[in-house]
Image (cartoon, rainbow, N blue to C red):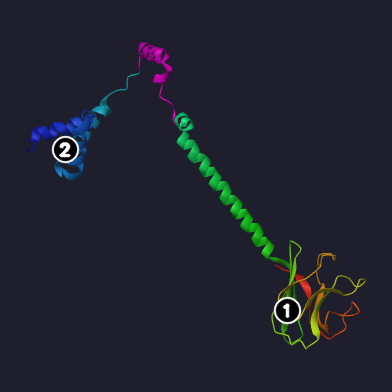
């Protein structure tokens, strides 16, 4: 059964006044979406009641009313007071658990990020020496912040039978060249500088061809195949 014009106007007015509850209110809200005529009627009642709101003068509450309100609050049992949002959240174990879990996840992500940044920093060389023979690049020496020094061969080197490749560095003119590694072929090699100071700027590294087992004198004896000096990385 379709509502008549008078019922429609009455329902619209009651909706605007906030008199509808439960199913009646839900039906009115549904009609606002589906019934254009009802929506216009609601809008018209909003406009009519707006005129009354504008013409009404504000009336301050009397002292007696405020005293009655305060007395009602003072006499109400504690359980009647509505807890604040923060109080409800604080007393909600599920919320506390979720908050703690979120904090743990955030801390874990921070730790992972810091660990990755530290590992990345360790992978970046602080010094580099490019070893060349004048025409080609034979190897690169990387010195890392954690104290490691690694030689990375970039080209194949022919090593005759009974010979080896020996890597040297010159920490100072006074000490002279020091052997820091042996190779039977060109490859990646972690150099042994444990008893030497950390390489500095413009420190010489070179590769020579020596007898099997390394130089018998503790000094380079064979031809220098590649050499280069350290420079600081950007």
Q: Which residue is mark 1?
A: 139
Q: Is residue 104 above or below residue 232?
A: above
Q: Secondary structure at mark 1?
A: strand
Instruction: Name the residue nearer the viewer: 25 or 50.
Output: 25
Count residues near mark 1 (Cα–Cα under 10 Å), then give few for <14, some for 14-19, many for 20+.
many
Circle 2 crowding by C-alpha within 10 Å: few under 14, some 14–19, many from 20: some
Q: Position of residue 54 (x, y in %)?
A: 27, 29
Residue at image location 59% in from the left, 50% down from the top: 110
Vertical placement of 135 versus 196: above or below?
below
Q: Which residue is mark 2?
A: 41
Looking at this view, name the residue that lies furthest to the right: 174
Mark 2 residue element: helix
Pick whichever, 125 or 180, lies toward us: 180
User: Is residue 75 covered in magenta?
Assistant: yes
Q: Residue at x 20, y 44 (%)?
A: 33
Q: Residue at x 76, y 63 (%)?
A: 147
Select label 2 or label 1 by which is in front. 1
Question: Residue 153, which numbered label?
Answer: none
x and y percent of residue 34 in the render? 17, 45
Start and end of the magenta stretch? Answer: 61-85
In the rendered structure, the answer to whether residue 48 lies left or right of residue 130 reads: left
Task: Please state, as top left, top right, bottom left or bottom right, where the N terminus lies in the image.
Answer: top left
| Membership of 71 in magenta stretch | yes
Instruction: Say above or below: 101 vs 15.
Output: below
Q: Residue at x 63, y 54 (%)?
A: 114
CA separation in Å, label 2 and label 1: 87 Å
């Amino acid at each position: 059964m379709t509502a008549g014009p008078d019922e429609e106007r009455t329902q619209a007015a009651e909706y605007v006044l906030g008199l509808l509850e439960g199913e009646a209110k839900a039906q009115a809200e549904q009609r606002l979406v589906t019934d254009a005529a009802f929506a216009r009627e609601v809008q018209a009642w909003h406009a009519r009641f707006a005129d009354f709101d504008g013409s009404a003068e504000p009336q301050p509450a009397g002292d007696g009313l405020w005293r009655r309100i305060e007395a009602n609050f003072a006499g109400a049992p504690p359980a009647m007071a509505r807890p604040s949002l923060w109080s409800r959240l604080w007393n909600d174990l599920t919320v506390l658990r979720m908050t703690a879990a979120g904090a743990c996840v955030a801390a874990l992500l921070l730790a992972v990020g810091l660990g990755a940044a530290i590992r990345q920093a360790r992978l970046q060389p602080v010094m580099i020496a490019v070893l060349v023979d004048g025409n080609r690049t034979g190897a690169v020496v990387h010195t890392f912040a954690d104290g490691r020094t690694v030689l990375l061969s970039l080209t194949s080197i022919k090593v005759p039978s009974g010979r080896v490749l020996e890597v040297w560095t010159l920490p100072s003119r006074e000490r002279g060249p020091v052997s820091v590694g042996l190779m039977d072929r060109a490859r990646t090699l972690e150099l042994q500088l444990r008893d030497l100071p950390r390489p500095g700027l413009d420190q010489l590294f070179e590769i020579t061809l020596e007898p099997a087992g390394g130089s018998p004198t503790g000094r380079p004896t064979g031809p220098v195949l590649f050499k280069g000096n350290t420079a600081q990385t950007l």
